[in-house]
Amino acid sequence: MNDLDPARLVAAMGDPRRRVDVRASTGSTQDDARAAAGDGAQAGSVFVADAQSSGRGRQGRVWSAPAGSALLASVLLAPRVEPRALPRLSLVVGLAVARACAARATSEIGVKWPNDVEARGRKLAGVLVEASFRGREAAHVVAGFGVNVRRASLPDDVAGRATSLEDEGARSLDRGELLAEIVRDLFGLLLPAFERDGLAPLLGELRARDVARGRLVEGDSVRGVALGLDDDGALRVSTERGPVAVQAGEVRFVSAG
Amino acid sequence: MAAKKRPTTPTQKPSSPATLDRLALAQLMRLMERRGVSELEYEDEAYKLRLVRGATASTSVVTMPAPASLPAVAPPPAEASDDHGGEFVTSPFVGTFYRSPSPEAPSFVEKGSLVKPGQTLCIVEAMKLMNEIEAEFGGTITDVLVENGKAVEFGQRLFKIKR
């Protein structure tokens, strides 16, 4: 795990005060970040592990990865946005991950709404944002992401539907550089823009990377052709009963056949 | 959807109609329908017009009315009390309501559960942001108002808690 040297990470992230916790292995960086948040860790703190045994996906799905194969990290956030806009943060984090992947891969990097990072129709990275609310305040927000870096990161059962930076022609597979770039981009550029102007400054790129547009999709209670992201970041789908804005859940691609 | 008429000014373009008649309005609405435009805002010297299509709340799990139908300044999604001493926990945003962290796991709370401040009551998910709603104060859950997996609107009542 030489590529996750803590001192090198802190230096590459450009802020000597930033807390960066590196672990050889952990259950879930998301749980590490949440525990630290409970103990008063600052927004901007980064939690990364070489290997993860019980990483979480949506609704309790497991995202595990053997040592050295994937970038597994969580960051603590304190976005200054109104609570109703908070879910859009999920798109912002996905975009940061997608941009860093795009800077390395030779293939085109897309985002499947809301924030699965894909290349050639295969999942390259996943993002999960967890927040907690008490009353009218978000108590803490933790954004976790997993990027498949080397081929070995892919369990057999998902190998056909997943890919890695290595598979996508990346010249560098250095996880530290990848993480530092995501953190710099997120905290230095994307998050400040989002706090100031909402999704508006990011919509162009989000739409350009949207792989769902024009395809037949199926969500929890909706089926139709994806029309793209609306200004609030919801996925507009043209259904039999007219266009609807999908806010939650997942969408799957449906083959036309 | 009212078209407000203000006094015309010298800078007004001569082509601007003095009033927006019903025919023009109907044409605009048809155009929006045809092009799949859900919201249209127009402003010039004479008019400020905002048209929002499909502004009635849908019962579907993942749909919501066009955002412009909501007030510009959101009322806080805090607990609101009712007449019988119970207080409601409401949803901070549009999303899907989950009573447990995963489909196999037991519910965070049940009717009758005694909860502490800060205890997780449910998850509201939107755009893959999993939002744990915590109890602001301790008390007894006297009602669970939404079924697991259902769509919730902004401000919708989720639980009733009696202190």
Image (tube, rainbow, N blue to C red):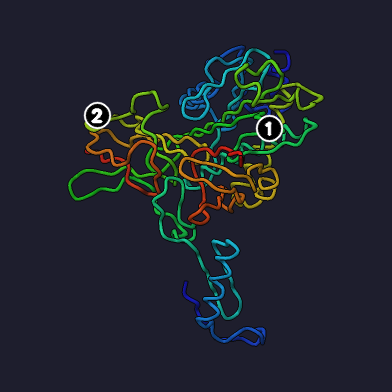
The disc at residue B114 is 2
**Left or right: where A112 falls relative to B56:** right
Residue A196 seen in the current view = no
Q: Are marks 2 and 1 in contact (CB under 8 Å)?
A: no
Horizontal and vertical percent position of residue A97: 67, 33
x, y percent for residue B128: 52, 37
User: On what subunit does the disc labeled 1 rest?
Assistant: A
In screen coordinates, is B47 left or right of A2? left
Q: Alpha-carbon distance for marks 2 and 1?
A: 42 Å
What's the amino acid at mark 1? Ile
- Residue lying at the far left of the rendered structure: B84
Q: Are marks 2 and 1 on the same chain?
A: no
Picture residue at 49% right of the left edge, 27% below the top: A37
The secondary element bearing badge 2 is classed as: strand
- The kind of residue on which mark 2 rests is Leu
Chain bearing tag 2 is: B
Residue drawn at 76 percent across, 27 percent down: A168
What residue is at 44 percent from the left and 60 percent from the top? B71
- For the residue pair A162 and B112, the one nearer the viewer reads as A162
Label 2: how many residues lie within 10 Å, few (<14), some (14-19) or many (20+)?
Answer: some
Q: Secondary structure at mark 1?
A: helix
Can you give x and y, in whole percent of width and height, for residue A173 in the image? Answer: 76, 21
**Disc on res. A182:** 1
Q: Nearer the viewer, residue B69 or A153?
A: A153
Quarter of the rendering occupied by the C terminus of chain B: top left
Determine the residue positioned at 43% across, 54% down.
B74
Establish if B23 lies above or below B148: below
Residue A187 found in image quarter:
top right
Which mark identifies residue A132? none
State whether residue A72 appears in this view: yes
**Depth check, front residue: A194 or A8:** A194
Q: Residues within 10 Å of mark 1 (few under 14, many from 20)?
A: many
